[in-house]
Image (spheres, rainbow, N blue to C red):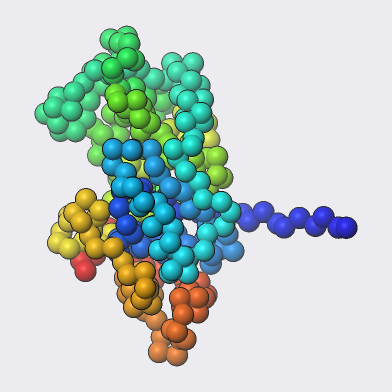
Amino acid sequence: MSSARLPIPAYRGRFAPSPSGQLHFGSLIAALGSYLQAKSSQGFWQVRIDDIDPPREVSGAAQDILQTLKAYGLKWDGEVSYQSQRNAAYENTLAWLDAQGLTYACACTRKIIKQRGGVSLNCCHDKQLHLAGNALRINLQKKAKVVDHFSDRLQGTVFLNNLEAKDDFIIKRKDGLYAYNLAVVVDDIEQGITEVVRGADLLDTTGKQISLYQLLNIQPPHYVHLPVAVTSPGQKLSKQNHALAIDKDNPIPTLIKALDFLGHKINNDVDTRSCATILQWATKNWSLDKIPRQREIQI
Ligand code: GLU
C-alpha cells in the first residue's frame, strides 16, 4: 500500500479563546477572521482553549464555545488543545530562561504597580528575591533592542508605549499560575503557528510576546489584529461586561453580520441557506484589503 503523505500546509493559524464565558459577537470576529485567513491561504486552522486561569474560568464554557464554532460551520483542523495540559512545556521554558539569567522574582503589589501607571519600573531587578510568594518577571535588560514597534499586516506599523516596552513583564504569577504572555508564545511555537489573527485589544501584548520570541531565538509569527466590536469608544464587547452569547440555533444572520463587520458584505447572489455555503463564498472572496483598518468599530 502506498503511504503518500499529505503535504504539510505552510500556513498555520489558530483561534485561542479563554473559557471565561460563551462565545459572543466580539469573539466570533476573531474566530471567523482567523479561520478565513487560514482557509484562504489553504492553511491549517487550529483551536486552542486558553484555560490557564481557573479563577476566571466558567464551568462548561469550553464545551459551549466548541459547540458554537461547530454551529457556525467553523471546522477546526486536528485536535483541540488545552493550555491546562501544558504545564510541563511552560516549566521547561521557564527553566531555560532561568538558566540564561533571564528571569527574576518581583515582590511589587498590584497597588504599587497601579500607582506607577501599570508598570513595575523593573524595581526588583537587583534584589535577588526568592520566588516563593512572588511573581516571576522576564529580564529584558539583557536584550540588545527594546521592542517598541512591530509590523502588523492590517494595522501597519504599531508603536508601543515606551515605558511599557521596557518594563520586565510577568511570566509566572504570584499565585503560581502561568502568565498569558508566556503560555501563548510557548504554545504558538509548539503548534507551529505562522500567523496570529486576533482582536486589536491584544495589540499591546504583542510587543511583549515578540520580546519573548527574541530571547528564545525564535522567529515570531506574522500578526493581523482585527478591529474590535465596541458598544461605545473603549467599551469592547467582552465576557466581563456580559456581552450576549451568539445564537447557536440560528447562526446565519449573525455570520452575515460578522462578515459585514469585517468588510465582506455578502452579495445578493450568494447562497445563504447554510453556514457552509456562506463560508465557501467568504473564503474565496477573503482579502485583508477589505477589512477596515481600525482598532475599534462601534456596533
Ligand atoms: N485567550 C486570549 C483571549 O481570549 C487570546 C489569545 C490570543 O489570541 O493570543 O483573549
Residue extending farthest bottom? 269
Q: Is residue 52 visible to the viewer in this orientation of the structure?
A: yes
Residue extending farthest left? 115
Q: Position of residue 110 (x, y in %)?
A: 18, 28
Q: Quadrant of the C terminus?
A: bottom left
The residue lying toward the viewer, choosing from 187 and 221, is 187
At x 42%, y 20%, the residue is: 102
The mark tally for this picture is: 0
At x 43%, y 84%, the residue is: 272
The residue lying toward the viewer, choosing from 64 and 200, is 64
Location of residue 168 with respect to 33 vertically, above or below: above
Location of residue 136 with respect to 114 vertically, above or below: above
Q: Position of residue 186 (x, y in %)?
A: 48, 36
Relative horizontal placement of residue 88, taking residue 143 as reference (left or right)? right
The residue lying toward the viewer, choosing from 156 and 242, is 242
Q: Position of residue 43 (x, y in %)?
A: 58, 59
Q: Quadrant of the N terminus?
A: bottom right
Residue extending farthest right? 1
